Amino acid sequence: MRREKKGSVTEPSRAVFLSYTSQDAKAARCICAPLRAAGVEVWLDQSELRGGDAWDRQIRKQIQDCALFLPIISANTQARLEGYFRLEWRLAVERTHLMSDRVAFLVPVVIDDTREQNADVPDAFRGVQWTRLPAGETSPAFIERVSRLLSGQESPDRTRPSFGGASSPVRSAPSPTSRWKQPAMLLVATLGVMGAGYLAVDKFWPPKHAAVPATAPLAQSALPVQSAIPEKSIAVLPFVDMSEQHDQGYFSDGLSEELINLLTQVPELRVPARTSSFYFKGKSDDIATIAQRLRVANVLEGSVRRSGTTLRVTAQLIRADNGYHLWSETYDRKLKDIFEIQDEIASAVVVALKIRLAALSETSRQRTSNIDAYNEYLLGRQVVNRGEVGELQQSIDAFKRAIALDPDYAAAYAGLAVSEATRADMMGEDAGLERARTAADKAIALAPTEADGYAARGFLRFVFDWDWAGARVDFEKALSLDPSDSDAQRNYGNLLRTLGSPTAGIAAIRKALEVDPLAARSWAALADSLTFVGDHAGAHEALRRGLEINPESAYILETLAILQLLESKFPEALENFSKTKFDGFRLPGTAMAEHSLGHAGESRRALDESVAKVAKESAYQIAEAFAWCGESDKAFEWLDRAYRQRDGGLTSINTDPLLASLHAHPRFKPFLRKMNLSE
């Protein structure tokens, strides 16, 4: 460890590293001062090097060399899912994997009333002794303990003082309420993100498929099988926003996404898609764990500091199995050079991995000569990625501003197309759908060799226009241009299932999961297809994996509840429908489950509430509920309304088990013909 002095640096020695968020700097200084007064060497970053390459390397070396790592835990660390202190935490956890006993290295300190059971910290912090120092007020007993640890006099144990001062045994596993182990909140209304940063079909096209008569189970063969981790594989983690105001997250995310796009162009290299890589954003999972979950041998991480028109990007390529840095670099450039930086990083990565360097695309879908247009595009995509229905107009406005600044910006047209269509679906606006079609056509006209325009138009043709042949052509074109587009792969699989080719559809969805293994919506789509071919066991396993990723996914919970309805597990179905936060799934689902339980009054109340609250966005789900409850005329009334509203749920009408009671009705086959579907 190195301790700074005036104009000099001492040789490495045993010392303490204080890790804290900027809001807790005062408390950190309160802890630092008495430790130093007692002769303890303390590394306390005072931001003199913050944001620079030298600072980044120094931090990593200090954590690697220090004798004790003191993470300061507070409400401020709980509130912030991002920040360099979390990277420091992760580096410390990684170091513990190389140690025989981590107890003598990690010394967590709590400076307020944050409770351990609710603390958002790495698991490694939970197996060691914690100390409470309110506001950083450091007691003589704490200084004595640090001194004993540094001298090796304190023997490691598995107890820690409680917040009252007594000792309590360490639990062998983290509290189930720990947000650290919970998957990220992917999307509130189950809106997905497609390859160019636009909404996927999940909420607007939730397919429900009839289970065929019992057949040989496909559970094991149909689910993706884990293979050996390929040497030529890399995950690009979200770069950390190190800007002074921490308001450039959309820009640092954009850099990470573009690097993913560039690296997927290298044929020899396996690169997980955005959804899976960004799953770890704001978490402190160590590199080895991330790499294992994503099935990669290498990880690329870094930081972005933007100030006005200047930019500093730091990137590191790390070998996952041993933590060695294969390559690192810092780029100090003007903002207008962002694309050059992206190319240089991608080129350096493939060289470091000893891969044949193919020519990178000169017409990347996100590129424009107007940096202001690029900035607006990134803002629009950030809004879309959050998945908030109420923010769709913001994304539309941002994409329009990008187009106004650069009328030839194909990627902005593709993003605009799906945002317009999604909002139109929610609002029941035909004009919005027409604007979306125009934007998608424009994206293709401007960039006929880029995949995202075709993926956007395929989405529109499939979900809203029911142009099955046209959608198939577009998806196949998109995938020929970009086989790594996991969203297009999943949607293509859903289309094949609708067209009567479930086996081919399962294969396409499996490809999507190979590229994007932590995409909860793809596990739900796989469950739909497995239910369709009669493999309920496989469907349950797929849903279990999806819930591990996102236990609050409305789409997965609804898919599970419908499967339970089909299996006559009505109380379980009601429970899972009730967990769904999206009213468009929860209310019609509750009506069906209550009806099956024989609770006619509760079922009717849920149906009435559905009609009153979610008629615009969930006409198809209301039709399902009426059909399940035996009210055929009402079901067709709502199917007609769904048709007028271009409801995406209608794409599953020919295979939906909830509509089984309507198949013999004289209106059913004419309705299928109206949708260009076979009887």
Image (cartoon, rainbow, N blue to C red):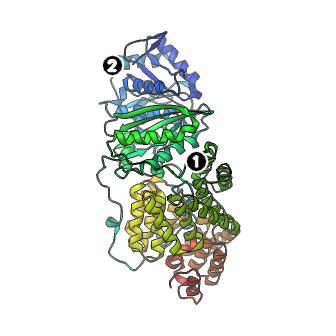
Looking at the rendering, which quadrant does residue 16 occupy?
top left
- Tell me how far mark 1 sits from mark 2, CA to CA: 59 Å
Q: Nearer the viewer, mark 1 or mark 2?
A: 1
599 displayed left or right of 109: right
Between 512 and 255, the residue placed more toward the observer is 255
What is the number of the mark on residue 152?
2
Determine the residue positioned at 31% across, 32% down: 98
Q: Which residue is mark 1?
A: 368
Residue 145 on image: x %, y %: 41, 19
Residue 31 on image: x %, y %: 52, 19
Residue 360 on image: x %, y %: 44, 48
79 displayed left or right of 616: left
**Screen quadrant of the N terminus:** top left
- Quick one: which residue is furthest to the bottom in this view? 666
Between 341 and 78, the residue placed more toward the observer is 341
**Which amino acid type is shown beneath numbered disc 1?**
Thr
The secondary structure type at the circle numbered 2 is loop
Residue 83 on image: x %, y %: 53, 34
Determine the residue positioned at 32% across, 30% down: 101
Relative to 26, is 477 above or below?
below
Relative to 353, is 576 above or below?
below
